[in-house]
Image (cartoon, rainbow, N blue to C red):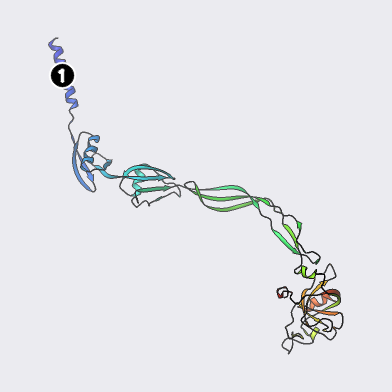
Amino acid sequence: MTRRFLFAMLTLVTIITFSLKVEAKEYKVEVDGKKITLDAKNQSELEEAIDKKYPGYKITAISDDLVKAEKFISIIFSDGGKEREVSVPNIEVSGILKYLNVKLKGADFVLPELNEKPFDNRVAVFRVEEKVEEKMADVDFKTIEEKSTDFKQTKEIVVQEGKKGLKKVFQKNKYINGIITSSVVVKEAVIYEAVDKIVKLPPIGADIINRGDLRSFVMSATAYEAGPLSTGKRPGQVGYGITASGTRARRGTVAVDRKVIPLGTKLYIKSLDPDVPDYGYAIAEDTGGAIKGMKIDLFMDTVYECFQFGRRKVQVFILPPDTPRTLFR
């Protein structure tokens, strides 16, 4: 081995030794607003030194002239309903989101709020989404009830069956973390209309009228009102609108010959003309000079109704005394 080779080897060992011997660097570190100086050869050693002096603290920012360290805490972080445990600086929520590189979009929100610190070691980001969605929906049909004038009818008769319609509904749905929280209909488009159900009801009290033991008479009917044309009295005069029974005349009051129908008798006046509706339930409360025998006078609200009614045949049913008063006006 020559001297030249030995010299080369010695030089190489010296260079390697020198390269491995790195001088420690002085770092200025800010912890909780206080600045201290720590020596370390690199960032890894600096982090160890910080943790040794301030357990739980980690580097959050580093520059040429200052290193910033914050205390870290363990929290449950939820983003859109998905939870995970993370270690973050013990700072306001806005800083935690920045540290985790989590961004809020649109109507997204976070609890606690951005300017607050984690509550109960939890931070939750709620993802909000609004979108217009469409769906098909039934249109319910209406049930229209018509009252029959045929007192032989004692049960409901379905004249037309109902049928549901169909419509397209556009609604704005709001989702929070994928769960719908509100829905507002913004538009509807009918595909086809519903068909109403039509039901014909028996006349009120048809069961009473259809009793086989009820007496009835076919009588000649006229109409009268409270004014001078019928009674010779005007509003304000004594006895205006007062019946022979002392009650006030109203629709449902009829004048009779008390020898045929006693006053106070409950009646049902049925039209014999299929195109004319029944007068209905009435009480014999009045009399009249021209009302003799098989005649009856029906009270109307106006002179026009009296002329329209004229004179016609009606069937007068004598109702039982216990007929409910609710059937009479």
Quadrant of res 306: bottom right
Judged from this view, the residue extending furthest toward the top is 1
The relative height of residue 61 versus residue 317 in the rendered view (above or below) is above
Residue 311 in view (yes/no): no
In this rendering, position of residue 61 left or right of residue 2? right
Judged from this view, the residue extending furthest toward the front is 213
**Where residue 316 appears, x then y in whole percent?**
82, 75
Quadrant where the image shows the C terminus: bottom right
In this rendering, position of residue 174 left or right of residue 281? left
In this rendering, position of residue 193 left or right of residue 310? left
Q: What residue would you read off at disc 1?
A: 11
Between 295 and 276, the one nearer to me in the picture: 295
Judged from this view, the residue extending furthest toward the left is 3
Q: How crowded is mark 1: few (under 14 residues within 10 Å), some or many (20 or more)?
A: few
**Where residue 248 appears, x then y in whole percent?**
72, 83
Quadrant of res 2: top left
Secondary structure state at the residue bearing disc 1:
helix
Between 79 and 191, the one nearer to me in the picture: 79
Between 143 and 227, the one nearer to me in the picture: 143
Between 207 and 120, the one nearer to me in the picture: 207
Quadrant where the image shows the N terminus: top left
The relative height of residue 35 versus residue 151 in the rendered view (above or below) is above
